[in-house]
Amino acid sequence: MAKRTSPLCLVARICPRPPIILFNNALQTFSFSTLLAPNQSKPSTKIKTFSHIFQECSNHRSLNPGKQAHARMIISGFVPTIFVSNCLIQMYVKCSHLNNAYKVFDRMNQRDVISYNTMIFGYAGFGKMDIAREFFISLPQRDVVSWNSMISGFLQNGECRKSIEFFMDMGRSGVRFDPTTFAVVLKACASLEEGGVGIQVHGLVIRMGFDNDVITGSALLDMYAKCKRLDDSLRVFGEIPVKNWVSWSAMIAGCVQNDQYVEGLELFKEMQSAGIGVSQSIYASVFRSCAGLSALKLGSQFHGHALKCGFGWDIIVGTATLDMYAKCGSMTDAQKLFNSLPKHSLQCYNAIIVGYARNDQGFEALLLFRLLLKSGLGFDEISLSGAFSACASIKRDIEGLQAHALAVKTTFSSNICVANAILDMYGKCGALAEAVHMFNGMDRRDAVSWNAIIAAQEQNGNEEDTLALFASMLRSRMEPDEFTYGSILKACASKQALNSGMEIHNRIIKSGMGFESFVAGALVDMYCKCGMVEEAEKIHNRTEKQTTVSWNAIISGFSLLEQSENALSFFSWMLEMGVKPDNFTYAIVLDTCANLATIGLGKQIHAQIIKQKLHSDVYISSTLVDMYSKCGNMQDSQLVFEKAPDRDFVTWNAIICGYAQHGLGEEALKAFENMQLQNVNPNHATFISVLRACAHIGLVDKGLYYFNAMVSDYGLDPQLEHYSCMVDIIGRSGRVGEALQLIQEMPLEADAVMWRTLLNICKIHGEFKIAEKATNSILQLEPQDSSACVLLSNIYADAGMWAKVSEMRKMMRQNKLKKEPGCSWIEVKEEVHAFLVGDKAHERCEGIYEMLDLLISEMKWDGCTPDVDFSFDGEAEEYEQPEELRSGTYNL
């Protein structure tokens, strides 16, 4: 009697140290065979054992034990059945050894449909669709699995249209569809956003009775959601009789994909009420909703929910939570979560790197990118794009060059997303030549590529090249989007090219983007900067969805055109419409308050800023410092400055400028020294304030020192404003001739402002000859400027040169120049009262003039003589009657 070999011993001989699971399966097989009745036929122990081993190795991707079992089978002389060979093929396919799988398939004497299907599945999974198709064609009789493998293979390899074509061929072949077929083809429709084809497939689903199937229903609602047909998606979801977590997950994700974040969260709430358990994908959608709504508090609550449900250490949920914190601007919480995760994936690193880059914390993003490189996890196009965005945010093209070199060493440099990020980085770092070189070297360009190079030219002040590139984009048949139009309209605004802007506007109207808030905001900005405020107002009023951005554009436009009252009116209207202001809105309004010197309104805005917890924003705090100083309240200006948690060069500039404007030169220079001690680099604006401070306190040598330090210490070339300050500094010290010499010898052409500065100095020192030269220069630059003529006439009057005064009056009459009346205003009980020189339109003007006469009388009685500079009106005939001059020269 032949001795029977135990399956356990067989496994032991096959694998000297086999996995425990193989021993367990062998034991299960042995127990099954020994429990059979004597009269029952016993299955072959070898067949059962080998198939079992191959299946277990396949399930656990255990290649080496599988190879050893295969070798033992060959040595033992065992001839495998079709079933055993199919198990062996499947094991090699699952372990990614297609060559070995093909060898087994090729040596099979007999093959069935499963043999072919396994090979089709293997080659399709590795993207070798041509070989998979050869196996499919050679298959004698195809079943639903054969067709599904091909349809799924094309989908996985991004060939969605071929996937749909094979689905249609399958229908013509007579093979019946199953839920898997519909799930795959609907996913292909979703990827292509082919809603029309998806509707036809839906009709087939209903006709074949699969409309109640939860898998097919989930695929249908996912397809409709991705095709931007959320209502249809919700209707399908409602018709599914029994919903599982997959259908709930797909529906919540669909709402998020269509930016219906609140509805997605409501569905999550319903799902919880229905007793359906949560999953990784559901949490991912929920956290995306919180990020989309910038709902940090709600996101934190969901984070607590995830911790309670045991997903605290899950890397996928953790990455989604981290991404939510980053998109809500809470990088502190994002970093804490990142540090608490037991292990980090590449996606986890990507989320925090991109988060820091988006929040303008480029140094932190680059630090984490370096940690990623050291981690051994590798990097992908998202990691590189995040690194380039970080370099752009801190304008560090040196680190950008290093990251570019890293991309070139890999295959990612040819990736369109990475190439666009490199292009954008060079543009934002001011490396325009490198940006152009990168753009010209791109094999393929999409709309983002064109937008990046157009934005780079516009940001670097090349308006002509910006418009030329836009024309090239149109010639390449690339359709502009809202970002393209945003950059082009900025270029038109900077150049004040109204005609070009109107042409762009015409194209925008034809494209149907004219009512979108982003494009409308750019149009409003362009028209305002071109002086067409009425047209800007019309566009704003026609905008379908007036967002904070569009309101900011019109308010900023009025402020830019010095129509401060209109700016405040639109701000009030914005609040009435229920639109929430942001930090930029408040900055514009505070600047308007500064221009009007309406400190009462400024304080109200300050209170709102504190309530909304925006006072820590560096942009806001800088504007508050500027507003209080311009309203004459240096005490509050200094208080805001001292309490500012973060100060950049703009904040320092605001306080230095405030001190300088109030004649507090010593304080301004002390603030400048403190700025240097804090390692904050000054810019051109800083030195303008510093030089003005030196002028106020008469520090000529100190002014010359700072003027020279601009170039020697900080590499800043002096601009016209700095030369104008130096003219003021030198002139105030009585060296008017040297001030004129500086103007004549400086490398820049003097503008009217500089000549006016010299003219004011001449008024102080009574230098009428140089004043005549300054006035002539002003009139050559601005022929309609009456103020220069008035000032020169005052200099003549002070010198007693009445003949010259008469000549000046005649010249002004001949040239039809009239003195622009002075204007002042005062805020009383939240109402602004404005007055012009000689104004009698105010309802209480009689009482005002009576009070003015009383004050002047008291001044004279007290021994003070009113300091009334000589001025003339075109109608005045006499120069020596103070009573007649009084109503024309005193500014109410």
Image (cartoon, rainbow, N blue to C red):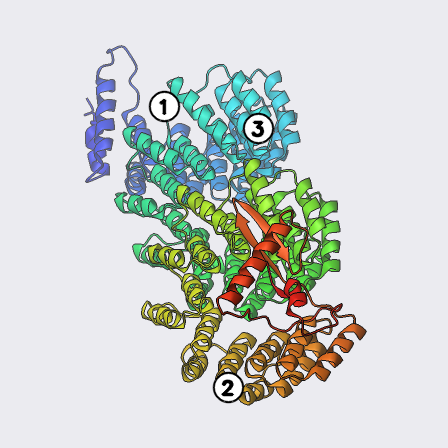
Please state which of the two labelled residues, at mark 2 or mark 3, is closer to the viewer. 2
Relative to residue 453, is residue 331 drawn left or right? left
Callout 3 touching callout 1 (CB < 8 Å): no
Q: Earlier in the sequence, mark 2 or mark 3?
A: 3
* Residue 277 image label: 1
Question: Residue 869, percent across and down?
Answer: 60, 72
Relative to residue 236, is residue 702 drawn left or right? left
How dense is the environment of label 1, judged by Cα within 10 Å: few (below 14), some, or many (20 and up)? few
Question: Residue 238, percent across and down?
Answer: 53, 18
Name the residue type under label 3: Leu
Please state which of the two labelled residues, at mark 3 or mark 1, is closer to the viewer. 3
Question: Residue 680, percent across and down?
Answer: 37, 67
Relative to residue 851, is residue 68 drawn left or right? left
Relative to residue 135, is residue 82 drawn left or right? left
Name the residue type under label 1: Gly
Reply above or below: 358 against 42: below
Which residue is denoted by mark 3 in the rendering?
230
Q: Earlier in the sequence, mark 2 or mark 1?
A: 1
How dense is the environment of label 3, judged by Cα within 10 Å: few (below 14), some, or many (20 and up)? many
Going 52% across and 62% down the picture, which residue do you hit? 858
* Residue 734 image label: 2
Q: Quadrant of the C terminus?
A: bottom right
Question: Residue 255, percent across and down?
Answer: 51, 30
Cα separation, mark 3 vs mark 1, equals 24 Å
